[in-house]
Image (cartoon, rainbow, N blue to C red):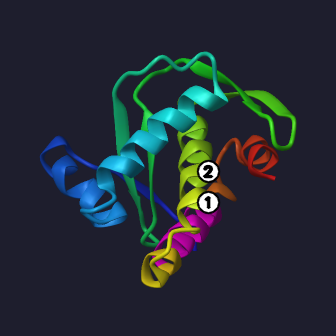
Amino acid sequence: MKITRNEVPPTARLAFLPKFFEARLMMRAEAMVYDQAGIMSADYNGGLWTFYTLSNGGFYLAPETDKRFTVYVPGNDYEGEVSADAFGVIVTLFVLGSLVWIDDEALREKFSDHYHQLRDYAKDHDEAGAIFRAID
């Protein structure tokens, strides 16, 4: 069954970060998303982000723009251009991958589950090839 996404409406945005990152980590995690975006793309200079939930229980954030981003991943030498949506998937996967090293075992499991839920969604993304090369 294909995993689908739903955009979080403005009225539900305040509940999004605490739901997926926990109240005690939500500010840190949000900052990690924006920092990671800046690290991965010189094209990123801030702006609004759209929040998405996935039908399999996952989520991701993506810049709210039509522009494309040149992405460079120093760890694997990936370089390519992707849509804002694919960029958001990549950035969110990197942040979730970092959060699985947190000291709290229950949160490690939660973030690992969310990583795999988003990765499963990415398999059917129009830019799956670029996403998987970036996270390889």
Q: Nearer the viewer, residue 127 or 100?
A: 100
At label 2, which amino acid type do we have? Phe
Q: Quadrant of residue 6?
A: bottom left
Q: Decide: is 124 above or below 85.
A: below
Residue 130 drawn in magenta = no
Instruction: State which region is magenta.
Output: 110-121
Point 82% across, 43% down: residue: 75
Q: Provide the secondary structure element on which disc 2 rests.
A: helix
Q: Is residue 136 left or right of residue 12?
A: right
Checking the image for residue 97, the label placed there is 1
Q: Position of residue 90 (x, y in %)?
A: 62, 45
Checking the image for residue 14, the label placed there is none
At label 1, which amino acid type do we have? Gly
Residue 114 drawn in magenta = yes
**Hey, which residue is sitting farthest front in the picture?**
103
Asked whether disc 1 touches disc 2, contact meaning CB atoms under 8 Å apart, the reply is yes
Q: Quadrant of residue 78?
A: top right
Label 2 environment density (alpha carbons within 10 Å; few <14, some 14–19, many ≥20):
some
Point 54% across, 17% down: residue: 67
**Hey, which residue is sitting farthest left in the picture?**
11
Viewport quadrant of the N terminus: bottom right
Q: Provide the secondary structure element on which disc 1 rests.
A: helix
Q: Position of residue 103 (x, y in %)?
A: 49, 74
Label 1 environment density (alpha carbons within 10 Å; few <14, some 14–19, many ≥20):
some
Q: Is residue 112 left or right of residue 72?
A: left
Q: Position of residue 95 (x, y in %)?
A: 55, 52
Residue identified by numbered label 2:
94
Q: Position of residue 3 (x, y in %)?
A: 53, 65
Q: Nearer the viewer, residue 43 or 29?
A: 29
